[in-house]
Image (spheres, grey):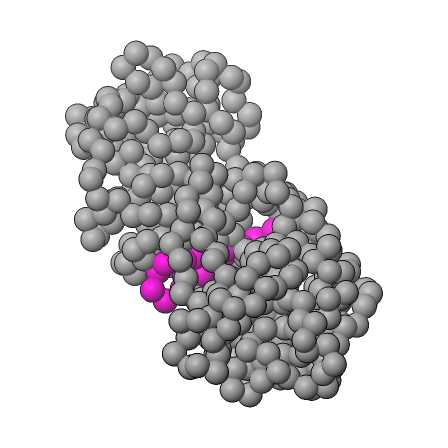
Amino acid sequence: MGRFARAGALLGALGLVASLALSGCSGESGGAQFVEGEQPAPSGSATSGTPDTPSGPPLTVSPADGAKDRPVSVEIGAKLPDGGTVSQVTLATEDGKKVKGKLRTDGSSWVPSAPLKWSTRYTATVTAKQPDGAVSEGTSSFTTMAKPGSMITSGLYLFDDKTYGVAMPVVAEFHPGIPEKDRAKVQKRMFVQTDPPQPGAWHWVGNGTQAFYRAPEYWQPGTKLSVRIALAGIPLSNGRYGNVDRSATAKIGSAFEMKVTNSDKQMRVYENGQLVKTLPVSLGKKKTPSSSGTLVVMEKKEATVFDTMDDPDPENRYVTDIQFAQRLTWGGEYIHAAPWSEHVQGRQNVSHGCVNVSMANAKWLFQRTKIGDPITITGTERKLAAGNGWTAWDLSWAEFVKGSALPVPDGGAGPAL
């Protein structure tokens, strides 16, 4: 039985791509507008338009005037009069350069659209209107901290202008994992917007190394996902800080779903809800069963090598050329071509946990699948382990939202920005 040791992550400018060295099969709606320049203010937005003359009591702005060593993730807030609403926020450097940002949809704070600069002085001005029409204003000048030496490593498994399957979760990764006491603070800085709008929620794996975002149901085909994991400068309780902001805008493609039943050893393939093909398969033998659950295609390799020579069981050591491999778990389970088992596919399970299909069927699948397409396997001797791959859809919605570090409204949350 082969084993797969999950390798470290390779961090790119737009996201994180795991080092997916192959080791074979294994037994294991819109928010407020940008704030910039002298744009006129749409209704309900914060902008740097021409302000009304202040006539009410001054606002207390945060960070406090004169504050030093503020994190570059700092947000601009103010203590508002009862019933007051923010009408304008500006943030600028000493040389007058304006900083873009957005007001949170709940009005609680204004979020810069990029991390602030280290060791830099800023001036924030907040204007608010009271119910009686009076205008209040407050100003604060503060300085950000120097760049810290101890940071986490983080990543985002999503890339600009790519098209993914309907089960593609937003996957944020952290090393070391985020301590439980810090997860709510970090989650507040992980922003997802969908077009058309679909509510969603975050779910943390137990050790805090990954967080998944999904909707109650699979994404609607054609959905645009806009994601910002705004972690740069976030202070954590373990003395570390978030390293960088990561963002990506991607698209969800057509619905393509695979369903495998062990009872008859068949894979049924659906496109946009219609059955288009049924394929015989061979799953994992009893000693190395395939995982039952809802899995997601994580990576595709047209040709690769499975090398399990480090497996402690001599019976599971091999080096084999593989074609049309599609990764399903970190533990080493794949869909792949297996010409050596074609004579038993549809009748007997002989693999080390993978979904074996014929060469012709493997190629047919490979040409149609996308990263993020779902595959559901049922009836095997083993349940899919949480976190062994992108397991966001292997939970009911009620179970999934229990993993959020923040309260989730019934049906899911809308965008925070």
Q: Quadrant of residue 324?
A: bottom right
Magenta run includes residue 331: no
The residue at the point 19 percent across, 49 percent down is 239
The residue at the point 73 percent across, 66 percent down is 359
Residue 47 vs 384, above or below: the answer is above
Of 283 and 13, the residue lying toward us: 283
Give the mark count.
0
Left or right, 396 with respect to 267, comes to left
- In the rendered image, residue 388, in percent from the top left (x then y), is placed at 47, 68
Residue 162 vs 399, above or below: the answer is above
- In the rendered image, residue 197, in percent from the top left (x then y), is placed at 62, 46
- In the rendered image, residue 281, in percent from the top left (x then y), is placed at 70, 76
Left or right, 118 with respect to 16, comes to left
Of 136 and 125, the residue lying toward us: 125
Furthest toward the top, the residue is: 95
The residue at the point 73 percent across, 70 percent down is 358
Residue 197 vs 88, above or below: the answer is below
Q: Quadrant of residue 97?
A: top left
Q: Which residues are magenta?
A: 198-213
Left or right, 3 with respect to 139, comes to right
Judge whether residue 104 can be spotted in this image.
no
Of 193 and 338, the residue lying toward us: 338
Judge whether residue 311 can be spotted in this image.
yes
- In the rendered image, residue 218, in percent from the top left (x then y), is placed at 64, 59
Of 353 and 407, the residue lying toward us: 353
Q: Quadrant of residue 262?
A: bottom right
The residue at the point 29 percent across, 39 percent down is 233
